Amino acid sequence: MHLIFAPSEFGIISKFEIYRSFLGQHKRLGEALWNAEPLLPYMIKSIEVDLHMTVARLLGASLDGSERNLPNFIDFCIKNSPHIRQRFQGMSEQVLFSQKKRIGAHGHTIAQIRGRRDKFFAHADKKYFDQPEKIYFDYPLQEDDFISLIQTMIEIVGEHEHWVTPNTTKSHFAEAFHISVDNMIRNLRTGREINFKDS
């Protein structure tokens, strides 16, 4: 759960909310966003690649063969649900199978993420050595599909978190990240207008 909900740079939710906020700003402002700060496309792409690597690791088929991933965790819960339900109320096999189905519904998106990771982000496939941009054409991925997958993962882990600590309300800082990105963009645009008003 820490890899999902930690408000630090290691938690998926922090990087995801920053990434989603930047995409929202770009949809709202268009090229004016890049005019405010030309480094932003590089920053957003770096966050995106980081998220690809993290999501691929959490969904299995890791490069080191680790079995510590969300699908295996759900399978473990299904296999041991009679024992787990004795301790954690609210969990049911029906919900667990629904979680597997919800992850499976993103199969195409997951395959594209793994392809990008295995062929380029984590390995140096010779096909992309001189033309790295081709990875995005060979493994196309819609931003909305990527966002939907991460939201599904967050929801599923959140359900398990609720079963373990049903009476605990945790703040996951999502709104704080949206506000911070909004403030950042506003400050960048204001600074650009002040410092480059004659250009």
Image: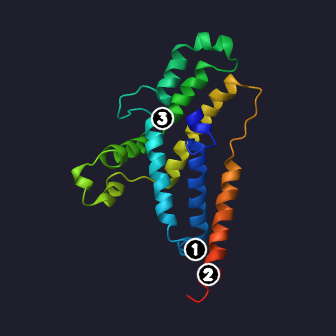
- Label 3 crowd bin: few (<14), some (14–19), many (20+), radius 10 Å: many
Who's the residue at 61% across and 68% down the image?
28
What amino acid type should be assigned to the residue bearing mark 3? Leu
- SS for tag 2? helix
Marks 2 and 3 in Cβ contact (< 8 Å): no
Q: Give the side of residue 157 with respect to residue 67, left or right.
A: right
Q: Which is closer to the viewer, label 2 or label 1?
A: 2
- Label 1 crowd bin: few (<14), some (14–19), many (20+), radius 10 Å: some
- SS for tag 1? helix
Residue 21 location (% of width, % of height) = 61, 57
The residue labelled by disc 1 is 36
Q: Residue furthest front?
A: 195
- Label 2 crowd bin: few (<14), some (14–19), many (20+), radius 10 Å: few
Mark 2 or mark 3, earlier in chain? 3
Residue 193 location (% of width, % of height) = 63, 81
The residue labelled by disc 3 is 58
Q: Is residue 187 above or below residue 6?
A: below
Q: Residue furthest left?
A: 126
Which quadrant holds the N terminus?
A: top right
Residue 13 location (% of width, % of height) = 60, 44
Q: Which is closer to the viewer, label 1 or label 3?
A: 1
Residue 114 location (% of width, % of height) = 38, 42
Mark 1 or mark 3, earlier in chain? 1
Who's the residue at 70% across and 57% down the image?
179
Q: Is residue 155 above or below residue 192?
A: above
Label ID, residue 195: 2
Tell me where residue 196 sits by quadrant. bottom right
What amino acid type should be assigned to the residue bearing mark 1? Ala
* Alpha-carbon span between mark 2 and mark 1: 11 Å
Query: Front-most of 176 and 61?
Result: 176
